[in-house]
Image: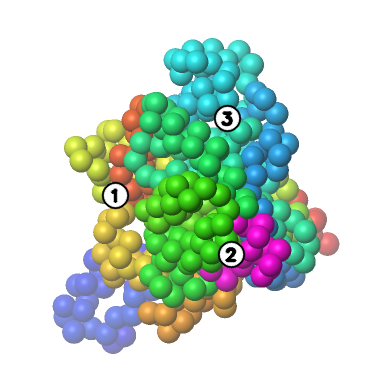
Amino acid sequence: MRVVTTGTDLLADALEAQAVTTERVDWRPPVAAPGSDVTADLARVALDPRRTDANARAVAAVLGVTAHLVDVGPASEVLGLERGEFLHAGPPIDWERASGPLRGALMGGAVLEGLVDDPEDAPALFADGSVSLGPCHHRGAVGPMAGVVTPSMWMWVLEDLETGRRTHCTLNEGLGKVLRYGAYGPDVLTRLRWMGDVLGPLLRAAVRRVRDEAGPLDVTGVLTQMLQMGDEAHNRNRAGTLMTLRDLAPALVTAGEPADVADVLRFVGGNDHFFLNLAMPACKLALDAARGIDGSTMVVAMARNGTDFGIQVAGTGDEWFTGPAQVADGLFLGDYGPADANPDIGDSAITETAGIGGFAMATAPAIVRLVGGTVPDALATTRRMHEITLAENPRWSVPVLDFQGTPTGIDVTRVCRTGILPQINTGMAGAVAGVGQVGAGLVTPPAGIFPAALARLAELAPPRP
C-alpha cells in the first residue's frame, strides 16, 4: 500500500509507524479573508490573459536594474523636502494612529529641525497639522524602522544609469538608542548633528570623487559579493559595510581634516549596519522598475509604520493594502521582553520584497544568533520562499544551496493559494517613545492583505469573453 497525505502530520506519522510507505504533500487551504471569495478571485486572476506576460516583464524589469551610488546630499536638496515636511516608513498614517517609536522619532526630528527646543513640545505640532507627514515610498525613498526623514538629514542617492531613475535613503546611525528606533535623547541629537555637519559632507566628497574618477560604486555588485560572504543584507551587513568602506576610504582620507576623517572611518567601521541604508534603496530602485505593469501580480513593496503593514502590487498602481502590523518573535536585549516591543516597523522589508533579507537567510546562517531559530530553519526558510515567488535572481545566489538564485518576485496569487507568508527578519523597537531598540526577530505580514490585493487584481482583470 502507498498512501499520499496532506494537511497535518498525524495520519502520516501513524502510517509510517506501521511501515506504510507514505508521501507527504505540503498543502494547505488558500488564505481566507472576511468579505472576500479567494477561490473566485484566484480563478479570475488566473484567467487574466495579461498575467503571464505581465509577470515576465515585471521580473525582467527588476532583474535588469543595477543600482549605482552617485551622490550624497541633504533631503532638502535631493528630495526637495521643505521646512515642516517629514517623511516616515510604511503606508500613510497620521499622528493620532502613530506608534510609540514613530512618535519618538518625529519628536526628535522636530528638535533637529529647530521647530521646537523640547521634544515634549513637538506632539502639538503634529496633532494640529503644522508639520506634514508622508510615506518615504511616495518620494522615491525608503527609511529603516521609523524611517523619519527631515529636510536637514543627509541621504544616499542611488541611480539606475540606464534609465536615470533614482532612489534615496538616510545614513545609518548604528544600533541601540537611535532616532529610527524612537529614541530622541541629547546623545541621539548630538550624533545626528555630527552626521549632518561632518559625516554627510565627507561622504559626499568621497562619493563624488569615486564617481568622477573611477565610475560610481556598483551597489548591486556589492550585494552580489556580500551574499557570498555571510550577509543577507537586512540584519547582517558586515561584509557589505567593510567593502563599501574599502572602496570609499582612499577618497575619504583626502576629503577633510584628519581628525574628522578618522572619526568617520571609526564610525563606519564600527557600525555593521551601515550598508543596510544602501541595500534598501538598491532594492527599491529595482522593484520600482516593475510598477504600473497592468496584470502583474508581483509585490513591489512591503512596508510597516509600526501600526499598519502594507503592500503594493505592480498591477494595482500606488494603492496600499494594509492590515495590523505584528510583533516579531525573536530575541530580546537585556531584561526586555515581548510586552516591551512595538509591532513591526520600517521600510526595510523592501529587502525581502527583492529576494534578500529573510528570503536569503540561507546565505547567512549566523543571523539566527540575532533573530532566533536554528541554522536548519534558515535553510528551510529560503527554500520555502521559492514557493511564493516568480523567479530566481541569478546575480544573488546562495552557496549552500548549490548557488541557487535567491527567490525573487513575491506573487500575490501564490501566497493566497499556498498560505505561505513572506518571512521577514527585523529589529524590534520599544513600544514607548524614547526607549530605542529592544531586540530582533522574525515576523510575517498579516495574512489578510494578500486576499485584499488579489480581490483588487480580480476587479481590474478584463471581463471574460
Q: Amino acid at mark 2?
A: Val
Kind of element beneath mark 3: loop
Q: Is residue 393 visible?
A: yes
Please tell me which of labels 3 and 1 falls first in the chain: 3
Residue at 80 percent across and 56 percent down: it is 462
Answer with left or right where residue 28 lies relative to residue 87.
Answer: left
106 up-or-down from 207: above or below: above
Q: Position of residue 286 (x, y in %)?
A: 65, 61
Tag 1 residue? 330
Residue 222 versus residue 5: which sits nearer the camera?
222
Please tell me which of labels 2 and 3 falls first in the chain: 3
Kind of element beneath mark 2: helix
Image quarter of the N terminus:
bottom left
- Mark pair 3, 1: CA separation: 26 Å
Image quarter of the C terminus:
bottom right
- Mark pair 2, 3: CA separation: 31 Å
Kind of element beneath mark 1: strand
Q: Quadrant of residue 128?
A: top right
* Residue range corresponding to the magenta coloring: 206-222
Residue 137 versus residue 281: which sits nearer the camera?
281
The numbered mark at residue 93 is 3
Tag 2 residue? 219
- Mark pair 2, 1: CA separation: 30 Å
Q: Position of residue 13 (x, y in %)?
A: 21, 72
164 up-or-down from 78: above or below: below
Please tell me which of labels 2 and 1 falls first in the chain: 2
Q: Position of residue 65 (x, y in %)?
A: 68, 66
Answer with left or right where residue 378 lies relative to residue 240.
Answer: left
Is residue 73 a member of the stretch shown in magenta?
no
